Image: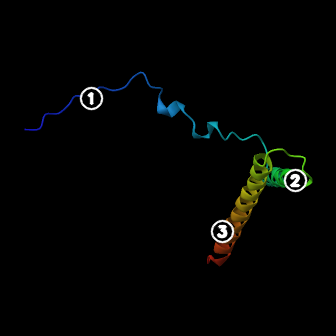
Amino acid sequence: MIELIPVKPIDHLPQLKNIELGNKLKDDGKSFTAFLQDALNTLEKIQEEGNAASLALITGEVDNLHTPVIALEKANLSLSLAVTVRNKVINAYQEIMRMQI
């Protein structure tokens, strides 16, 4: 015969209904256009930092190789992410345009 283990309710945990999913993503009144503009400005800044780091490496202003390589890889990853997001947005738009009403 299977013996059941009694389970007591956990009262000391906060109630889940009081936790909001959007705590980390609160609406600060920014429009989607402003969000996109901020993201593109950040991307441009990271690309400029990568260019400056490579120029500093070429001119010999940097003693270690790690700093410019990290800056260039960060720029590369940021650009790859931006291109991937752009491609996903274009694919989503094309899917919406293919829908029949």
For mark 3, what is the residue?
A: 92
Closer to the chain start, of discs 3 and 2, is 2
Spatial CA distance of label 3 from label 2 is 30 Å
Query: Splitting the image into 4 quarters, where does residue 86 fall?
Result: bottom right
Q: In the rendered image of this protein, does residue 50 appear above or below residue 97?
A: above
For the C terminus, the quadrant is bottom right
Spatial CA distance of label 2 from label 1 is 59 Å
Name the foreground residue: 56 vs 21.
56
Q: Is residue 67 left or right of residue 9?
A: right
Residue shown at 83% from the left, 55% from the top: 47
For mark 1, what is the residue?
A: 7
Q: Is residue 43 left or right of residue 3?
A: right
Q: SS class of the residue under badge 2? A: helix
Q: Is residue 80 left or right of residue 54?
A: left
Residue 96 spot, x, y in % from top left: 65, 71
Closer to the chain start, of discs 2 and 1, is 1
Closer to the chain start, of discs 3 and 1, is 1
Amino acid, disc 3:
Ala
Q: SS class of the residue under badge 3? A: helix
The residue most toward the left is 1
Amino acid, disc 2:
Glu
Residue shown at 86% from the left, 46% from the top: 62
| Callout 2 touching callout 1 (CB < 8 Å) | no
Amino acid, disc 1:
Val
Q: In the rendered image of this protein, does residue 10 appear above or below residue 54?
A: above
